[in-house]
Every structure is written in C-alpha cells, then in structure tokens.
Image (cartoon, rainbow, N blue to C red):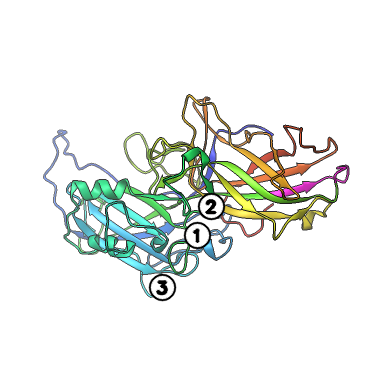
Amino acid sequence: MMRTRLSYLLIAPLLMLCAACVSEEGVPEEVTTTEMTLRMKINMGLEENTPTARADKGEPDRYDPASGKFEEIATLRVIILHGTDREVEGARLVATSSDGTPLNDNLEFKVASNEKKTIVLIANEESLTPPAGVKGMSVSEYLDQFAQKGTKISDSQWKQLNEWKVEMPDFNPSVPELEQTYTKSLFSTTGLNPRLPLTEIWEIETLSEAQRQNKTDEVQEVTLFMTRAAAKATFHFDIDPSYSGSGSKVTGIRFWGVAPIQTVFPQNAVYSPAKYTASGEPNVVADGKRFITYFTPADLTFPGTFLIDMSEDPVEIKPYGEQDAPVRGPIYFAEYRFPQDDRLDFTVAVELDGNDNWLEAQPLTDNILLINGIFNAIARNTHLEIHITFGSSGITCTTEVLPYIGVDLKPSFGFDELK
C-alpha cells in the first residue's frame, strides 16, 4: 500500500467576491460602508459526487450521511465579528435537522459592507465542556456571552476562546500520561444527548461598494466548511481460511497513540490546497477536496492507550464471508502528533481468549500523517480503517508482527457503509 502523507478532509469551496477600492492614481478612495445581507451555507462534509441542493435562504448544502446518531447535527452557532475590534455584529444559535439544515430559521445576517469579518462556527456545542477557568456556566451559557450584537470580545476572552480545550472523558490527571488508559470516546459522555462537535473559524471580506449592484439590498452568499473535532477509527477483522488458530477469540483491542487533550478549534492546520490564496482570499476548490498536511498539537503531551473491552462481544477467529466480517468501533479520540525527537509509531495490540494475553501488532505506518518526514500524526476529521488480519503465517505469542495491521483512510468521515 502506498504511504500517504495526508489525512483526508472532504470540504466544499468558499465562494466570495473581494476587491480593493483604489482610484486610477493608485490612491485609496474614501471607503463607505452600508448595511448588506450576508447569506451563509455551511457544509459539514459533502459527499463526493453527490448532487448539491440549491440553498435559496441560507440553508447548508446536502451533506454526507452520518454514521449513527452521534455524527448527526443538532445545533449550529454562528458568531460574526468586525475584524478590527472583535465587536459582535451578528450571532445566532439555530436548531438543525440531522444533516445541519436550520429548522424554522436561516443563516442570513445584516452586516456592514466593505470590511473584514471573523466568523466563528460551532455545531453540537452541548457535547463540549466550557473552557478552563469558566465556573458556574454551561457551555451554551458561556457562548451566550457573545450572542448580543455590539458586544466586544476582549483580548483575554478571545485568547480563552481560541485556546479552548477538551479532554478524553476518563483522563486522570493523577496518572502518568504514558500509563493512561481510555475506554470512552471523546465527547461520548458529556451532555444529555451527546453528538460529535464540528468547528472552524473563518475570515472573509464583505463586498465593497463598487462591487454592489443594488445599494439598498445587496446579498453576498458564502459557502463555508466545518471540521469534525475528533479522529475516528474502526477495526476490521480479516481471517483467512489458511489461518491455523481457529477457535480462539479476540477479547480486546488496544490502540496506542491517543492524546489526553485537544483544542476545540483546529490550531495551525495547513490545508492542501490551501484554505486561502497567497493574497488572503478564499481558495476555491472545484471538486471540494482538501487535505490536512500539518498541524500543531495544543500542548506537548504524551499518548495513552484506548482500550476496547470485547469480553462480552468477542470475535471468533474463523473464516467469514465478505459481508459478515466483524467490525468493532467506531471510537473517537483526540488528534495527536508525536514529538519530533521520539520517532514513535501508532500501534495496535489484540487480546486472545482473555487472561491478559496480548499480542502486539506491527506499527501503523500506512496512511498515517507524516510531518516533515520525521514524526507521525493523526489529525481530527480523519477516519482510520484498521484491518486486523490473521493469515497463513499463523499467530503466536512470540510473533512480533502478527496480526498484520493495514490502514485505509476513507475520503469521507461519515459513511454508513464502510467499503
């Protein structure tokens, strides 16, 4: 399998008109701003080759089918800021259908023309925990501080929002990080109706007066994307008829390389093609495909192990038909990049027949994000299909590279049917 250095992210292009207002002599003309309508469509992962539905009133385009209720969309919060002073110009929390389409609402905002905007997007906020230092407020109450038009976000508030972090639900700060064992997916235990959050922060320019065709009611339409705030893995068992150890059962899976914390918003992510052009304008991608090629973790942390206890639902090691091959997961976990000097790999082990009888697998190398050719990473919005194969070479407690592990990145995060 060819090694890929990219974690795949399906997104839609951002469409925008942007120009400078300059006189023939090259001297900037006096700029005037008037109210206009900004109409947004938000894409949470558009399925490749799926026709899009025209959104006439700001509804998002059609999305990938979610894989289970956890990946559906329940709410969407939009916060629009004047770019220079971070004054709230528009804000809204809307209930949505499962694909993110607003219910009984739209995503149209009256904003000033001819200026830079910062747009904060958060879906499924109730599954988040408030930022560090926030006491006595739910996450929605915290975000409601920025819901009133005219509110100015201070430097300290903006820093708190940008550096907002979440942690694995059963992270124990009293246990050394390298000894941490996680058994619950990220976001899976918070809130009454947990769902996977999606986030992004955008900067756009609204139309200049010269670009506006109707001075009283010009509409600018933009399509933005959001990123799922977790990595995902599923474990697929491939048992060849030639395998001689039939009758045993896999009673557990260990996945090593899971960070204890991550930021709510992507930090220092580099997209390919780039999110913006060299001149700072949105970079339009015709087919909607982008990759995350680099990211910086929130803190220098050490990875722990995600443990899947299969004792109540073991996988019997025997040949299966293609349609019946066992799958365990998905699990959702914090993105991680190994420190540059450690030269470490993500690894998987399986337990046979209980009794803490673990077999280490060959390190995951195929389709793991490789940064600068030096250290490995798994970014958010990445789906790893991990195949655990039992073959003709057999499997014993002394065999270091068995069962063999292969990884296929999927071009979408939320397919119902894994192929």
Q: Please name whichever residue, 224 or 149, is drawn nearer the observer in this view of the structure.
A: 149
> Is residue 321 highlighted in magenta?
no
Magenta segment range? 236-245
Q: Are circles 2 and 1 on residues that touch, CB within 8 Å?
A: yes
Point out which mark residue 188 bears. Answer: 1
Q: x%, y% of residue 155?
A: 19, 46
Q: Where, by quadrant of the figure, is residue 20 drawn?
A: top left
Mark 3 — residue? Answer: 103
Q: Amino acid at mark 3?
A: Leu
Is residue 168 positioned above or below 110 on the image?
above
Q: Amino acid at mark 2?
A: Tyr
Q: CA distance from mark 3 to mark 2?
A: 28 Å
Name the secondary structure under disc 3: loop
Q: Is residue 17 visible?
A: no
Residue with the mark numbered 2: 332
Please state, as top left, top right, bottom left or bottom right, where the N terminus lies in the image. Answer: top right
